[in-house]
């Protein structure tokens, strides 16, 4: 491993740093963006059941808001349960925007890493080419410097792509996941409003 880093030269450290950050963000988002954590499928039924048994209370709202992102959206709507449906929907939409923004956290960073990694690899390639041309002199070229320059150029190009491709795949995946979860939470919240105002019996 250290021999590979040495062969790739000092530009590889930028890509190593980018890969560590990308890996950390991917693991963190995989844990946070689990559908069962963001939008528990049984939460709506549990909320309706508790409302019928105990009604709305500050303790219930606090517990609900802390349970999940969907629970946070439900809690925002239930705070205005005695208001007209339009007011309740507005509160839900405002909370939904905040929750959606939180779900998208770090995705911009991951997308940036996916975009700049090939450029960092290209930078390493340029450094390697400079070393190759720098090895040329009146007496000929130095084989050691020539070989090192080629290694720097090729390793950085390859590692830049190795970092960029998974980062872009996961960035696209997480964007799609956030969009799906946002739609799911919106549908659940609308259903809660309609049930609370007796517009739908199911």
Image (spheres, helix red, strand yellow):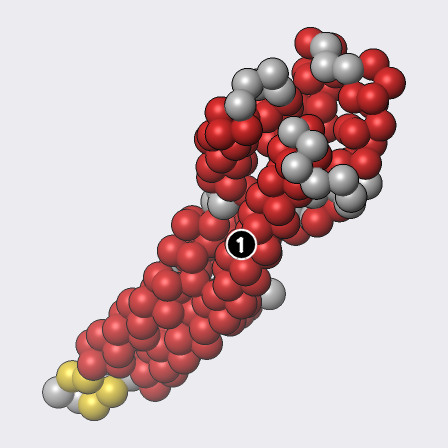
Of residues 64 and 152, which is closer to you in this image?
64
Residue 20 visible in image: no
Badge 1: few (under 14), some or many (20 or more) residues near its Cα, within 10 Å?
few
Q: Is residue 27 left or right of residue 95?
A: right
Q: Nearer the viewer, residue 124 or 21?
A: 21
Which quadrant would residue 127 be assigned to in this image? bottom left
Q: Residue at x 37, y 69 (%)?
A: 118
Task: Classify 169 as above or below 30.
Answer: below
The residue depicted at 49 percent of the width and 45 percent of the height is: 104
| Residue 122 vs residue 145, the one in the foreground | 122
Q: Quadrant of the C terminus?
A: top right
Asked where in the image residue 41 lies, by quadrant, the reply is top right
Looking at the picture, tell me which residue is in the foreground, 18 or 128: 18
Q: Residue at x 26, y 78 (%)?
A: 129
Instruction: Count the marks.
Output: 1
The N terminus sits in image quarter: bottom right
Res. 118 visible in picture:
yes
The residue where tag 1 is placed is 179
Residue 61 sits above or below residue 44 on the image: above
Picture layout, residue 152 above or below residue 15: below
| Callout 1: SS | helix
Task: Look at the picture and state if 12 lies above or below 75.
Answer: below
Q: Residue furthest top?
A: 58
Give left or right: position of 191 versus 110.
right
Give the quadrant of residue 149: bottom left
Horizontal side, residue 30 vs residue 52: left or right: left
Residue 80 location (% of width, % of height): 57, 18
């Amino acid at each position: 491993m250290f021999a590979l880093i040495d062969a790739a030269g000092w530009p590889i450290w930028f890509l190593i740093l980018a890969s560590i950050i990308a890996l950390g963000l991917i693991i963190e988002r995989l844990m946070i963006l689990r559908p069962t954590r963001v939008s528990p499928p049984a939460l709506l039924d549990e909320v309706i059941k508790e409302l019928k048994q105990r009604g709305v209370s500050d303790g219930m709202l606090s517990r609900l808001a802390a349970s999940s992102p969907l629970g946070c959206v439900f809690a925002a709507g239930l705070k205005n349960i005695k208001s007209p449906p339009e007011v309740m929907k507005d509160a839900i939409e405002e909370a939904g925007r905040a929750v959606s923004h939180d779900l998208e956290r770090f995705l911009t960073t991951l997308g940036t890493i996916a975009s700049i990694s090939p450029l960092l690899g290209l930078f390493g390639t340029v450094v390697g080419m400079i070393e190759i041309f720098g090895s040329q002199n009146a007496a000929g070229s130095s084989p050691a410097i020539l070989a090192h320059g080629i290694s720097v150029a090729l390793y950085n190009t390859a590692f830049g792509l190795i970092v960029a491709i998974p980062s872009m795949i996961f960035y696209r995946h997480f964007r799609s996941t956030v969009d799906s979860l946002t739609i799911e939470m919106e549908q659940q919240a609308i259903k809660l409003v309609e049930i609370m105002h007796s517009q739908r019996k199911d």
